[in-house]
Image (spheres, rainbow, N blue to C red):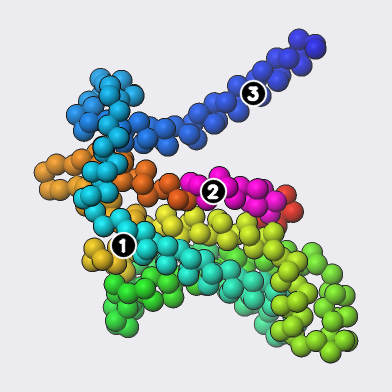
Amino acid sequence: MPASLFARRAAVYLALGLAVAIVAFPLVWMTLSALKTNAEVINPAAPPWPAVPRWSNIGEALSQAPFGRWYLNTAIFGVAATAGQLTTGLLAGYAFALLDFPGRRVLFVLALSGLMVPFSAIIVPMSELLGGLGWLNTYQGLIVPNIASGLGAFLFRQFFLGTPRELGEAARLDGASELRVFLRVYAPLARPVTAALAIILFLQNWNNFLFPLIVVNTTDMAVLSQGLSVFRSQFTTDYNLIMAASLIAITPVLLLAVTAQRHIIEGITLGALD
């Protein structure tokens, strides 16, 4: 192998290794901190690994908070919001791409404009609206405002623009209704995109912190991202238990991301997420 080619490959592998180390560092640091004493975590001179791994931190964190209830709340919120976002995104993307109706382009631009508004700008009116509806500390307050997805509408529209219209026209000539054309012809074609987007949206909803913070203020209705605050008090903070609780909170989504990474890559490979 020529020396120049070997040097280029070595540089590429070094850059990739450095990128992996940077990405993995927070997870490794959190895991090591979860096994330390609190004194080791807050001591900047302590080594990055625990002197004696304290696996009991996991059990202690579980015993100090209702993780079962928070897992249930987070799962209900994540699954329902993701299902709603996929449904509305799929329908809107199909309509914007393959149906002809007045104002289609204007409505599509309005749908996309929602992506440009920062969430921090609508926190106050959103909180007042949900309070007026009596939806604070409820599942509908967590789920309903999240079932519309401008990102989903955009991605599905881009995918359907690449599908032949002749498929739908042939089905209509055979007497299929518009709903049947959508459900039997076009929706199955979008399965790889749907699978990839479902995983991405579920991870996003599972880790959502700011929106649940304005809707929920009781322990029973809290989600995992909010619940970590119980390990902080006015005068002390158990950082090792916070890290242990964070490890408990992210384990399900970490396993999901690892096992479903093939679907994410397939969706990106198809060009649907470009």
Amino acid found under the numbered disc labelled 3: Tyr
Residue at numbered disc 1: 69
Q: Which residue does the image show at 69% across and 59% down from the upper left?
A: 192
Q: Which residues are magenta?
A: 254-268
Residue at numbered disc 2: 257
In this view, 254 is above or below 142: above
Q: Which residue does the image show at 12% across and 48% down from the upper left?
A: 234
Along the line of sight, which residue is nearer the eye, 41 or 115?
A: 41
- Magenta stretch prevailing secondary structure: helix
Return the x and y of residue 75 as percentages of the image width and height.
42, 62
* Few, some or many residues within 10 Å of mark 2 (<14, 14–19, 20+): some
Marks 3 and 1: which is nearer the front? 1
Return the x and y of residue 253 as percentages of the image width and height.
47, 51
Q: Pick whichever of labels 3 and 1 is earlier in the sequence.
A: 3
Amino acid found under the numbered disc labelled 2: Ala
Gap in angstroms between the C-alphas marked 3 and 1 = 44 Å
Gap in angstroms between the C-alphas marked 2 and 1 = 23 Å
The answer to whether the residues at label 2 and label 1 have Cβ atoms under 8 Å apart is no
The answer to whether the residues at label 3 and label 2 have Cβ atoms under 8 Å apart is no
Residue at numbered disc 3: 13
